[in-house]
Image (tube, helix red, strand yellow):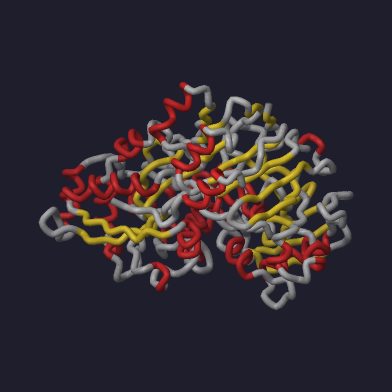
């Protein structure tokens, strides 16, 4: 039986001692799955959940995510840049027009100079404001930036290292903060995080590390349609699902991420709301395919894909996920036409193992790094136990290296041979596919960790060629055709074990109104009210 490293002691004590924030009118209190408060310096840690709660609500990028079309995967919309375009004479040059009359929360102006200052924070390690932690997070997604230049007081050019048509879908990760506030904070990012200033619809007004982050409505937000209805938003880390459940039932919070699956029926019966909505998510085992790893052998990768009973995992989750047979679900235009159609097929798995010299009497011994909780991880400990028990009779002896979510995220950005990886043959790390560049991030040789998040150092020449051609194409139909071909090869090659797609479960009080889930890792809290 697996034992989480993080307990509910701190959160339970806070509830018992009355340290949790009181219920005010128009205050929304959310219990996150994170084990700590995400950083509040504008580039949050804690993965997608960090950006969901301490990123996009309080900060904007040049381009933002569009949450207004819930029936489709969220696209992009103008942010601090009112428009952008590719330079037709140079497909490595993107031109951004910066909005007029936008102010940071500290009252200073958003200017082209402020934007270039933020680019230096991430990409110029010689600049005074260089932030190594933030740089590692952003560059793991946006590693193709080459340089930038101020054109005039309203226009900025950003150059990529090669033509990269997906760049607009990647730049939202780079959120913009106030240079003036950083100066007031003694040129210190830790101090800045105590009193940060962005431009978002919420302002971060209180940070108690490890306990809560409080935000207030930005009455002067530049997009009048997204001025929040809430007066306050309070975010509380609670990594244990049972603790989140108790906090919701007792009224200590109004909303919890990832309720325990077996509690969903009783929550519904008690009048709580359950939100389930698809979003671009996959919960895989990311294989280390380097020489020396057992999963360097394609037959073993395919065998594990046939050895896992995905329906058993979905049943445990009470229908709050669906089986995955690729990075994308089959109805996605990028899915393609793979020849391998993974499902629970023990005999096929055994045949592949036998061909590779393994079987129940001589099992494949592999170490998988898993987390105790985390963004998009759902219920990682019991889910992995189900997998471990299911595949053992077939011929896989899985050992788990259990770490906290923050460690997992750092490991993902390091080489698979790095000491932090603890000799893992795979990482169980949830990932998204919100934009066409997802395949580039996960399977391109130019995204090998630590330069990107192709952690397993997967490399296949045909896939690389297709991805390069897709990123250089500005024809959307051609992009889709090339990405679908690349994805089909990745599936057949079993670059990962594809297990489930999450349906983004969250539970909330009946008092919470106006929430419309987006097909995104991030959400819009500006329309939410609490009665």
Residue 53, above or below 412: above
Q: Quadrant of the C terminus?
A: top right
Snapshot quadrant of residue 422 = bottom left
Question: Could you tell whether 395 is left or right of 134 in the image?
Answer: left
- Check the image and name the residue furthest to the bottom: 126
Question: Could you tell whether 291 is left or right of 41 in the image?
Answer: left
Snapshot quadrant of residue 91 = bottom right
Snapshot quadrant of residue 416 = bottom left
Question: Could you tell whether 401 is left or right of 299 in the image?
Answer: right
Give the camera-side residue of 155 and 104. 104
From the top left corner, tell me how far across and down residue 36 is, in percent: 55, 55
From the top left corner, tell me how far across and down residue 230 is, in percent: 73, 35
Residue 375, above or below 145: above
From the top left corner, tell me how far across and down residue 299 is, in percent: 24, 56
Residue beneath the point at 71% across and 46% down: 215
Residue beneath the point at 29% across and 70% down: 292
């Amino acid at each position: 039986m697996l034992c989480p490293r993080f307990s509910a002691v701190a959160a339970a004590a806070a509830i018992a001692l009355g340290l949790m924030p009181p219920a005010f009118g128009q205050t929304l209190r959310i219990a996150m799955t994170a084990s700590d408060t995400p950083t509040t310096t504008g580039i949050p840690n804690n993965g997608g959940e960090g950006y969901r709660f301490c990123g996009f609500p309080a900060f904007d990028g040049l381009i933002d995510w569009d949450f207004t079309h819930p029936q489709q995967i969220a696209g992009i919309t103008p942010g601090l840049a009112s428009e952008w375009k590719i330079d037709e004479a140079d497909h490595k040059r993107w031109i951004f027009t910066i909005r007029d009359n936008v102010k940071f929360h500290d009252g200073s102006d958003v200017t082209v100079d402020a934007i270039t200052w933020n680019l230096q924070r991430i990409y110029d390690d010689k600049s005074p404001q260089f932030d190594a932690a933030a740089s590692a997070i952003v560059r793991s997604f946006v590693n193709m930036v080459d340089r930038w230049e101020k054109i005039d007081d309203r226009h900025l050019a950003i150059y990529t290292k090669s033509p990269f048509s997906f760049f607009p879908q990647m730049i939202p990760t780079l959120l913009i903060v106030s240079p003036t506030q950083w100066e007031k904070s003694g040129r210190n990012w830790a101090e800045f995080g105590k009193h940060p200033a962005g431009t978002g619809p919420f302002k971060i007004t209180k940070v108690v590390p490890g306990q809560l982050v409080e935000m207030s409505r930005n009455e002067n937000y530049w997009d009048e349609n997204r001025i929040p209805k809430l007066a306050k938003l309070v975010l509380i880390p609670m990594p244990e699902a049972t603790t989140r459940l108790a906090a919701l039932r007792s009224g200590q919070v109004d909303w919890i991420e990832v309720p325990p699956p077996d509690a969903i029926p009783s929550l519904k019966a008690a009048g709580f709301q359950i939100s389930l909505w698809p979003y671009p998510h996959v919960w895989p085992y990311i294989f280390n395919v380097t020489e020396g790893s057992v999963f360097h052998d394609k037959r073993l990768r395919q065998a594990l894909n046939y050895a896992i009973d995905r329906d058993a995992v979905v049943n445990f989750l009470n229908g709050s996920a669906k089986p995955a047979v690729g990075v994308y679900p089959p109805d996605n235009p990028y899915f393609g036409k793979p020849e391998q159609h993974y499902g629970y097929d023990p005999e096929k798995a055994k045949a592949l193992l036998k061909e590779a010299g393994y079987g129940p009497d001589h099992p494949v011994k592999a170490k998988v790094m898993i987390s105790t909780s985390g963004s998009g991880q759902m219920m990682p400990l019991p889910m992995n136990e189900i997998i471990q028990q299911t595949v053992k009779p077939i011929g896989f002896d899985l050992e788990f290296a259990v770490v906290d979510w923050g460690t997992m995220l750092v490991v993902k950005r390091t080489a698979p041979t790095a000491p932090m990886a603890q000799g893992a043959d795979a990482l169980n790390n949830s990932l998204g596919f919100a934009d066409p560049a997802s395949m580039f991030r996960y399977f391109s040789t130019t995204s090998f960790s630590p330069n990107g998040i192709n952690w397993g150092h997967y490399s296949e020449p045909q896939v690389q060629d297709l991805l390069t051609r897709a990123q250089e194409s500005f024809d959307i139909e051609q992009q889709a055709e090339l990405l679908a071909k690349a994805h089909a090869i990745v599936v057949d090659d079993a670059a990962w074990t594809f297990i489930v797609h999450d349906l983004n479960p969250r539970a909330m009080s009946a008092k919470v109104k106006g929430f419309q889930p987006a097909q995104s890792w991030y959400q819009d809290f500006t329309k939410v009210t609490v009665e």
